[in-house]
Amino acid sequence: MPGSNGGLRRAILPMHSAGPYSTYRLFEWCMATMMVLIAFTLAMPGDTMERNALKPIAHMGFSEPNMALIFGCVGSVRVMALFLNGYINNIRIGPQGVYARAAGAAVGCAIMGQFATALVYDAFTVTHAPSFVIPVFGTLAGFEAISVYIAVLDGVSR
């Protein structure tokens, strides 16, 4: 890429070890890793969903085993897609990796959005006090929506 003085510009970030298409995907890596770690946490012995902050989510019908399965599967597929997306020549194989990334981010957006919605509903109807986790889940849902958009743009550009 030519710079303003006619020479080549250096990249803002060095190339990620997972390949050239992973350099600007740090949030996607963060969410994919978080999903896998949440799956491990939910699979551990004990009743994680009985904590006060998570009771509204448990009342929505989610159980620890099904949540661990969803988080584990989606997080693993996302990690695999992000890793392979950097090494696979998308011109020869096609942009399937970016669509797996987009689907994983869409599922993450839906889950985090449901968590935020459940806690907002609980704050206004039951406890009459908001949880400090509402902005965390809301922010994660918003940035997951942006990740869907970015992944789809990556797929279209290839």
Image (cartoon, rainbow, N blue to C red):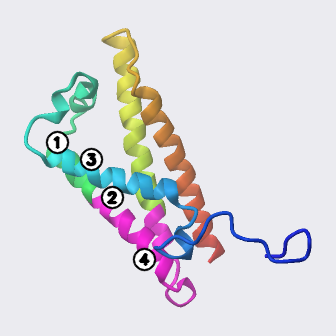
User: Upstream in the sequence, badge 3 or badge 1?
Assistant: 3
Q: CB of mark 1 within 8 Å of CB of mark 4?
A: no
From the image, which quarter does the C terminus lie in? bottom right
Measure how far apart labels 4 and 3 are at the Cα level: 22 Å
Measure how far apart labels 4 and 2 are at the Cα level: 14 Å
Q: Is residue 18 left or right of residue 55?
A: right
Task: Say if the magenta span includes residue 108.
Answer: no
Q: CB of mark 4 within 8 Å of CB of mark 2?
A: no
Q: Position of residue 4 (x, y in %)?
A: 90, 68
Question: How many other residues sit within 10 Å of disc 1, few (<14), some (14-19) or many (≥20)?
Answer: some
* Disc marking residue 142: none
Q: Residue drawn 80% across and 77% down?
A: 8
User: Upstream in the sequence, badge 1 or badge 2?
Assistant: 1
Q: Main secondary structure of the magenta part?
A: helix
Question: Between residues 30 and 127, which one lies in front from this camera angle?
Answer: 30
In magenta, the rendered stretch is 73-101
Amino acid type at circle 1 is: Glu
Amino acid type at circle 4 is: Leu
Amino acid type at circle 2 is: Gly
Question: Between residues 135 and 12, which one lies in front from this camera angle?
Answer: 12
Kindly indicate the quadrant of the structure image that contains residue 83.
bottom left
Residue labelled with disc 1: 64
- Which residue, as the protein is rendered here, is positioned at the far left? 45
Measure how far apart labels 3 and 1 are at the Cα level: 10 Å
Residue labelled with disc 3: 38
